[in-house]
Amino acid sequence: MPKSVRIVIQLPVELKRQLDELKRQGYTTSGFIRAMLERELQKSELRPTELKRLPIRR
């Protein structure tokens, strides 16, 4: 696996509860989010050069 970086995100309480339920079923939060991101980015019509141009909301 390439070098990893750590990110911190804020979630609504309900999403956190759902992730906690997945954890009780044996999934890790990191593994679930990583797999979901990889899956979504693969099927996305956006290419990496287009992703760089997306605005960052703060």
Image (cartoon, grey):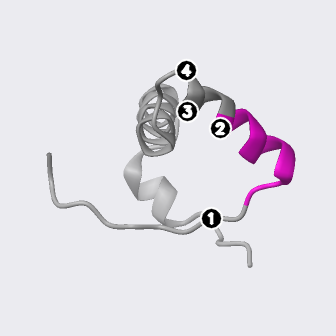
Please give the residue where the numbered disc 3 appears in the rendered image.
23
Q: Where residue 9 is drawn, which disc sits there?
A: 1
Q: Chief secondary structure of the magenta span?
A: helix
| Image side of residue 41 versus residue 15, left or right | left
Q: How far across and down, in percent of the image, does residue 5 sit?
A: 32, 66
Sequence-first tag of 2 and 1: 1
What amino acid is labelled 3 in the image? Lys
Mark 2 and mark 1 in contact? Answer it, CB < 8 Å. Answer: no
Looking at the rendered image, the disc whose residue lies closer to the viewer, 4 or 1, is 4
> Up-down: is 30 above or below 36?
below
Contact between labelled residues 4 and 3, with CB atoms less than 8 Å apart:
yes
Left or right of residue 13, residue 46 in this image:
left
Image quarter of residue 18: top right
Check disc 4 and report the residue beneath it.
Answer: 25
The reply to whether the C-beta atoms of the residues labelled 2 and 3 are less than 8 Å apart is yes
Q: What amino acid does circle 4 point to?
A: Gln
- Image quadrant holding the C terminus, namely bottom right
Disc 3 element: helix
Q: Is residue 12 above or below residue 19?
A: below
Location of the N terminus (image quadrant): top left
Is residue 46 found left or right of 10 in the rendered image? left
Q: How busy is the neighbourhood of tag 4: few (under 14 within 10 Å), some, or many (20 plus)?
A: few
Residue 46 is tagged as none
Residue 14 image point, x, y percent: 85, 43
| Element carrying mark 4 | loop
